[in-house]
């Protein structure tokens, strides 16, 4: 990245401004703005997240906000209520109080003498969620948003319930926030009240996973703040981005298809990162794109930002399987709109171990009106699969679309999924899926013939199955892989469906063992090229642990050949590209100086004990101890995850998320330790959790939880 200090505007910063909410709680803000804004007010841009502006995000903030301020904006980074140096308690994500606070912050900004009354919001992940959700509330000063790595559907396209199946990241992310929500404020900012504020957080926080497990259906808890419930509520321009390696790869195209405002989409090869910090690369000059967006929509400068394609995305070329990539080979491609008129939904029949040619499929080469229509690329992702399979249609009442052939069966072992990688990759530790051949040994596998020409897909593949299962609760995971001539298999995309859950709004439907159903699985969106000599593989499994929590009992899945299909969103490989302005080199302001005091530790270990048949995935992400030189603060952050199971005992899976957060300056030495363990039997989930607070070596707070939550069709 090129670090730029010579910017159009000289800037100043205020590290701790207090913004009082209507209920008296004070939020802490860090502001960067042009010196000239005292006399010539400028638009204000808000980033609003719970990840501690004074230390844990301060390096990233120092790259972004001074850069934007140097282009003529007042940039404001606010800690959510109950986090960092803001007062109060953070009890859950995206609550009404959080969004009301954001509206009050925007109103406060618009009234400041250095602000011209116009505001924008930006962010990655939580910050992007906040911006999109607040935009749907239509605060009067908010004129545009810039969002990265987000979703518009909190239930089915977040870390919670993919296709109605419980994701292990439901536990992992809950563990993350259990730790972040219980960290102390900095005494150097809040003074002697730090201990009182800290204990208020400790005493009023419970493990977030409990609330998330209490809502296993798509109820009002999830619908609230899910923008997909009413896209028309968003009335300001949106610049949306994500990465194909991220868990949030689907919402960009859904917004392009469903919003009725000026909008642009950008999807690269990245994991859960801003595009200018993108890994795997290539990273791009994202902040330059952001400045152009703000100039157009906050300052009214006619700069042509809306010219050219609606969507620019990285078409990924083939790569050997690896858990990490420095760069993904490929090229930028462009689409004028979404759904794209250039993409054709091509349907292939599934026969015995083979993906058939399109002309062999029931009904021809695609569904009626498939090109660019639901459930094609505009629908993107498991949320649509979930809705489309709502409820599963009994085959004796459905259009068979041709006479069925014989049943192909599989009952997957719990080991299928150990090489699945993380739901949302952070590229550290290496967390992408590894070679799928071992996974395929416990799966039902279908291959195309060896390709004779290049095939490119862009959008969300769809698997429609004519199936029967042996248990009332059943799950199917579908994976598409790029199979090289040497047999190695690189996973391209996947989807998971809890077959009987429907769309999550109705009562879960217990399946009748042996009865025929039709079910649809919408896989995550992707842009991928398959070269000549390779094969495209579809793999189906009845478990995908630990990425998704398995059903309570092993399931025998029967898939009927001839009446089950795979539909691919095919983009012409030789289509001339629309001219697109090239991206600049990644750049930002010089980062704050830090000193590493202890080494980083990163591990991703898969172990199997063939004496007691215990399988284990252990993940360590320890940032080590880092000194933030500008404030003289040492900070340590260690995350640990462990997922275990025994043989094929489907009641044996267990997940653990443990965090240690430490803060040290002179004689102030404080740490928080959290641990959450999730277990199950056939009927309920069991949650055991602990929260401990320390001053030096003395434990000053301790609490534990031992609770159960009934399984509700999971």
Image (cartoon, rainbow, N blue to C red):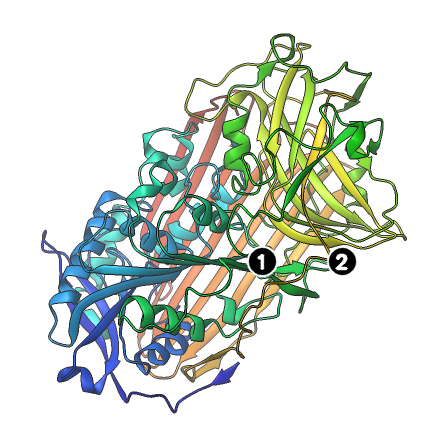
Disc 2/disc 1 C-alpha distance (Å): 29 Å
Q: Which sits earlier in the primary sequence, circle 2 or circle 1? A: 2
Question: Disc 1 marks which residue?
Answer: 620
**Residue at the extreme right:** 486
Q: Is residue 442 visible?
A: no
Task: Write the residue at 66% across / 65% down.
Answer: 331
Q: Residue furthest bottom?
A: 6
Tags 2 and 1 touching, CB below 8 Å = no
- In-image side of 419 versus 215 (left or right): right
Badge 2, how many Cα within 10 Å: few under 14, some, many 20+?
some
Where does residue 42 sit, x and y in percent of width and height? 21, 76
Q: Is residue 391 above or below residue 622?
A: above
Along the line of sight, the residue nearer the viewer: 253 or 713: 253
Of helix, strand and loop, which one carries label 1? Answer: strand
Q: Quadrant of residue 325?
A: bottom right
Q: Is residue 568 above or below residue 506?
A: below
Q: Is residue 98 above or below residue 629?
A: above
Report whether 657 appears left or right of 64: right
Relative to 27, is 94 above or below?
above
- In percent of width and height, residue 155 lies at 43, 37
> Which residue bears the numbered disc 2?
318
């Amino acid at each position: 990245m090129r670090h730029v200090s010579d910017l159009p505007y000289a800037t100043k910063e205020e590290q701790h401004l207090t913004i009082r909410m209507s209920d008296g709680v004070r939020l802490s803000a860090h502001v960067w703005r042009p010196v000239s804004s005292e006399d010539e007010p400028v638009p204000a841009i808000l980033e609003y997240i719970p990840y501690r502006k004074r230390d844990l995000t301060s390096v990233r903030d120092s790259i972004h906000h001074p850069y934007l301020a140097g282009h003529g904006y007042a940039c404001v980074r606010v800690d959510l209520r109950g986090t960092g140096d803001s007062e109060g308690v953070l009890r859950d994500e995206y609550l009404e109080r959080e969004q009301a606070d954001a509206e009050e912050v925007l109103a406060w900004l618009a009234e400041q003498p250095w602000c011209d009354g116009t505001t924008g919001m930006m962010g990655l992940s939580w910050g992007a969620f906040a911006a999109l959700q607040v935009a749907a509330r239509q605060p009067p000063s908010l004129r545009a948003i810039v969002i990265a790595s987000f979703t518009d559907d909190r239930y089915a396209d977040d870390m919670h319930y993919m296709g109605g199946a419980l994701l292990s990241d439901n536990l992992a992310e809950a563990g993350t926030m259990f730790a972040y929500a219980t960290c102390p404020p900095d005494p150097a900012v809040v003074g002697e009240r730090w201990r009182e504020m800290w204990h208020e957080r400790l005493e009023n926080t419970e493990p977030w996973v409990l609330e998330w497990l209490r809502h296993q259906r798509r109820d009002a808890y999830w619908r609230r703040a899910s923008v997909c419930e009413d896209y028309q509520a968003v009335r300001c321009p949106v610049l949306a981005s994500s990465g194909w390696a991220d868990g949030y790869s689907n919402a960009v195209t859904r917004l392009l298809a469903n919003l009725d405002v000026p909008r642009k989409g950008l999807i690269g090869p990245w994991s859960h990162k801003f595009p200018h910090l993108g890994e795997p690369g290539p990273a791009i000059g994202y902040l330059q794109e952001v400045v152009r967006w703000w100039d157009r929509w906050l300052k009214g400068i006619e700069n042509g930002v809306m010219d050219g394609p609606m969507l620019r995305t990285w078409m990924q070329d083939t790569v050997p399987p690896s858990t990490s990539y420095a760069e993904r080979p490929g090229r930028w491609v462009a689409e004028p709109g979404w759904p794209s008129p250039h993409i054709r939904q091509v349907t292939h029949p599934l026969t015995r171990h083979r993906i058939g040619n399109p002309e062999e499929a029931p009904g021809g080469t695609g569904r009626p009106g498939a090109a660019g229509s639901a459930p094609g690329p505009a629908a993107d992702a498991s949320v649509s699969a979930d809705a489309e399979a709502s409820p599963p249609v009994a085959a004796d009442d459905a259009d068979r679309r041709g006479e069925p052939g014989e049943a192909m069966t599989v009952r997957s072992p719990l080991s299928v999924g150990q090489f699945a990688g993380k739901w949302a990759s952070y590229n550290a530790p290496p967390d992408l899926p590894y070679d799928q051949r071992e996974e395929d040994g416990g799966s039902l596998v279908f291959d195309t013939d060896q390709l004779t020409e290049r095939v490119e897909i862009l959008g969300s593949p769809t698997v429609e199955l004519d199936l029967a299962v042996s248990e009332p609760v059943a799950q199917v995971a579908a994976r598409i892989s790029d199979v090289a001539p040497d047999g190695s298999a690189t996973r391209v995309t996947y989807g998971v469906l809890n077959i009987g859950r429907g769309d999550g709004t109705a009562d879960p439907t217990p399946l009748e063992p042996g009865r025929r159903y039709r079910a649809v699985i919408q896989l995550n969106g992707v842009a991928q090229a398959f070269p000549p000599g390779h094969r495209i593989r579809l793999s189906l499994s009845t478990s995908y642990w630990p990425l998704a929590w398995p059903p309570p009992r092993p399931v025998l899945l029967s898939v009927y050949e001839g009446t089950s299909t795979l539909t691919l969103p095919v983009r012409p490989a030789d289509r001339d590209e629309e001219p697109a302005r090239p991206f600049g080199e990644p750049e930002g302001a010089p980062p704050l100086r830090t000193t590493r005091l202890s080494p980083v530790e990163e591990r991703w270990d898969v172990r199997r004990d063939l004496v007691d048949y215990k399988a284990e995935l252990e993940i360590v992400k320890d940032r080590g101890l880092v000194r933030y030189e500008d404030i003289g603060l040492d900070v340590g952050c260690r995350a640990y995850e462990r997922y275990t199971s025994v043989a094929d005992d489907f009641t044996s899976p267990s997940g653990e998320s443990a965090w240690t957060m430490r803060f040290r300056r002179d004689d102030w030495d404080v740490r928080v330790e959290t641990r959450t363990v999730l277990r199950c039997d056939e009927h309920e989930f069991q949650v055991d959790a602990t929260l401990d607070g320390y001053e030096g070596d003395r434990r000053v707070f301790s609490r534990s939880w031992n609770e159960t939550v009934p399984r509700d069709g999971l």
